[in-house]
Amino acid sequence: MAQPKYITDIDKLEAIPEEERSRLKRITEKFVFRVNDYYLKLIDWNDPEDPIRKLVIPNEGELLEYGRWDASDEDTNYVVPGCQHKYRSTALLIVSEVCGAYCRYCFRKRLFRTDVKEAMSDVEPGLAYIAAHPEIDNVLLTGGDSLILATPKLKSILERLRAIPHVKIIRLGSKLPVFNPMRIYEDPELLETIRAHSTPERRIYVMAHINHPREITTEAKLGFEALHQAGAIVVNQTPVLRGINDDPAVLGELLDKLSWAGVTPYYFFVNRPVAGNSDFVLPLERVYRIVEEAKARTSGLGKRVRLSMSHTSGKIEILAIEDGKAYLKYHQSREGAYGKFLTLDCPSDAAWFDDLPGNERYWKRPVKRTDAVVSVNELPDVPRRATKIAK
């Protein structure tokens, strides 16, 4: 199957009426647009509420006053340019500022601004930091999308990480398993690279971003199987998004189809309060109910998924929301508070941890560790016109 053609000009999408394209064009001047013809074929253009369409086609709600560019204060996680170290055993290398698609709900929309440079083609400072910190036993390659990298570049990074004895797990963050699965199963060099560096002692995990069961096509399943045969372990994470997967039947079907394909359901996330994400926001109590009803429809394998908020202070697991109370636990913590149990009032309109009265007792906003990384929340709301988007 031929590699898909990428499209970065919304005027090229003739399935969208010209008048609507004209309105959406101004959104792409603030939040970039990118999609491919393989993924576009999954859209039912006769349905204006089609969930696949909503995932990648701009919406006018993106221009509403809402949220922050960096809602989880990732600028405070950087230790050197291109490398974040928030949790003791895990480091992130931001290796790409390009994605297969620019999902409209993306919590790192800031990376695609022309005045922001967080992704590094030179990963040497990050590798040196990881090598000097033996407590780091797993590294996530992310961005952007790690599998957008040319295979020789990705191979070079994997080889360098495997030369660091204490790095046992390497994670590849990617939506390409469903956005361009052919990139995986038609690239023998990529699969051989994974096979060489994913061993019984030191695994490679592919952290897939699959939001809706319709993304799990025949081609996607070929991609999963190719990754499995190469020795990678594939897991999935998705936010619960209004208008896309906020239906227990849809999420339950997703859990089933992932489990059937050998992809571990890993996280359901609460959508972060990021600039441009207003249309996707749901109240916490609603998210919790949807997830619980979805889990009730699936096997124990599907029920392994956790519902969490990726907050500035850590990953906060939602254990239950009952009778106006939120029962929470730190699943990961910047301050070493793993396992700390919290009970907070949960107003009906609360959509994030910061909306829960009394939350401020449990955390404080961290301080940046390096001034070499820009704090995008301090930049003007509208970036300069994009010129660096990959074609």
Image: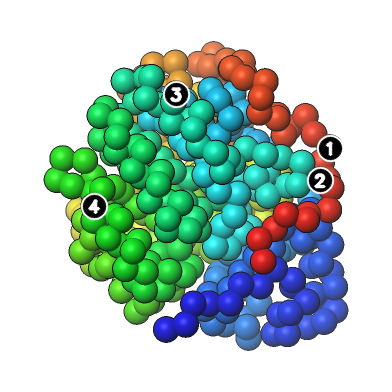
Give me the C-alpha separation between circle 1 and circle 3: 31 Å
Q: Earlier in the sequence, mark 2 or mark 3?
A: 3
Give me the C-alpha separation between circle 4 and circle 2: 41 Å
**Disc number placed over residue 380 in the picture, else none:** 1
Q: Earlier in the sequence, mark 1 or mark 4?
A: 4
**Mark 3 belongs to which amino acid?**
Tyr
The residue where tag 2 is placed is 383
- Asked whether 386 or 255 is in front, the reply is 386
Q: Secondary structure at mark 3?
A: helix
In the rendered view, tell whether residue 333 sits above or below residue 107. Answer: above
Q: Earlier in the sequence, mark 3 or mark 4?
A: 3
**Disc number placed over residue 203 in the picture, else none:** none
Q: Residue at x 29, y 55 (%)?
A: 194
Whether tag 1 and tag 2 are in contact, CB under 8 A, the answer is: yes
Q: Residues within 10 Å of mark 1 (few under 14, many from 20)?
A: few
Q: Is residue 207 left or right of residue 30?
A: left
Instruction: Please say whether residue 382 is visible from this viewpoint.
Output: yes
Give me the C-alpha separation between circle 1 and circle 2: 7 Å
**Mark 1 belongs to which amino acid?**
Pro
**Mark 4 belongs to which amino acid?**
Ala
Q: Report x, y in % for residue 112.
A: 68, 49
The residue where tag 4 is placed is 196
**Mark 2 belongs to which amino acid?**
Pro
Q: Is residue 165 left or right of residue 11?
A: left
In the rendered view, tell whether residue 339 sits above or below residue 213. Answer: above
